[in-house]
Amino acid sequence: METERPLHILLADDERLTLEILGTVLEAHGFQVHLSTTPVDAIASIERERFDAVVTDVVFDGRSAGEEILAATRKLQPQAICLLMTGYPRVDAAVQAMKVGAVDYLQKPVEPKVLAATIQRAVSEKRLAKEELPFQDLVDILSGLVAKSIERVDPYTAGHGERTRRYCRLVAEDFGLDAKTVERLELAAIAHDYGKIFLDDLGFLTKQGALSPRERMEMKRHPLVGAERLGAHPQLAEVVQFVAEHHERWDGTGYPFRIKGREISRPGRILCVVEVFDSLTTRRSYKNAWSLQKTIDYFESQAGRAFDPEILDTFLRLLEAHGASWLEAPKADLTAAGLLVPAERGELPSPPRIAAGTIGSGILTQQA
């Protein structure tokens, strides 16, 4: 299978330090980046090279020249998406620049991880808009989209959407759900945390320790925000519903709508159980992974309370067959993301090196 080429990004800003910081982070995320500090250089680059995205400041040396860069992009490279960075999001220049082709803007100072996620999302959405694809292909494409957006903002969720997708499919097929519903459930499983990248404050996603009441309220917005951001396309109606429902609870204590029992769709109830399982058994910035037995004990205590007993019975039966391998899967994904130390991966640490001149003194120096 041919490896997907890296996205080619043009960054234009008259602040050299800002460009270098953003460029370094984007390159670390796999983008190919070209930097321009003047509108003239940016437009020359657009005439010379092909870009997937053009990201530009609005104001250059006191002049609203970002509009010129966007106009050149729209004329010469209509396939490229355009994003604005601006310290003045409410001024007329920003509004006018949006009119000449920008799909979104980010207020400066721009968080590099948010920029990376925004670029990937916008490029993927543009590709989806112009292609007629089988629904299962849309599922596969969105899987990559989420992996390169929410998982970059919160690396501890690496693989969470794809694992949730696989387990949901097994549960749904065990219940005999039709193929169309299973496809929609898979897509919802991948996209269930999509709303997180649109929250006002993303810093708490990797916070060490418990969330504050304000942060918890902000986090609770993500199912509804994600459902709204997925849009109103008729083919996505069920997907949007399942995403909105994934934090609802059987006894009505969930959110955002506090619906209960069979008011929650069966796919929504399946996604609820599976999402909680993978969250509990995965290490996050604020907690260690739970053991299989601790997780099973928790689910059994919540049957008929948080979770549909019928779905929970099926899921626990699947855990008997797959539990051990399912608990190992997050470790592999977190290791690939560089978030597990050797001891957590089950490896022995490297032996310490003895610094020159310290033999006999009892002093050892371990190099990282």
Image (cartoon, grey):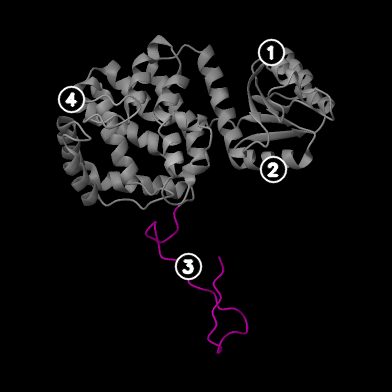
Foreground mark, 1 or 3?
1
Q: CA distance from mark 4 to mark 3?
A: 48 Å
Find disc 4 in the rendering and name its residue: 175
The quarter of the picture where residue 299 lies is: top left
Query: Residue 323: x, y in percent?
Result: 23, 45
Q: Of marks 2 and 1, which one's residue comes earlier in the chain?
A: 2
Name which residue type carries label 1.
Lys
Of 7 and 194, the residue lying toward us = 194
Question: Image quadrant for the C terminus?
Answer: bottom right
Discs 2/1, front: 1
Residue type for callout 4: Phe
Please give the range of residues in magenta. 340-368
Q: CA distance from mark 1 to mark 3?
A: 57 Å
Point out the tag, 4 or 3, that comes first from the N-terminus.
4
Q: Which mark is residue 350?
A: 3
Disc 2: which residue: 21
Query: Which residue is identified by label 1?
Result: 99
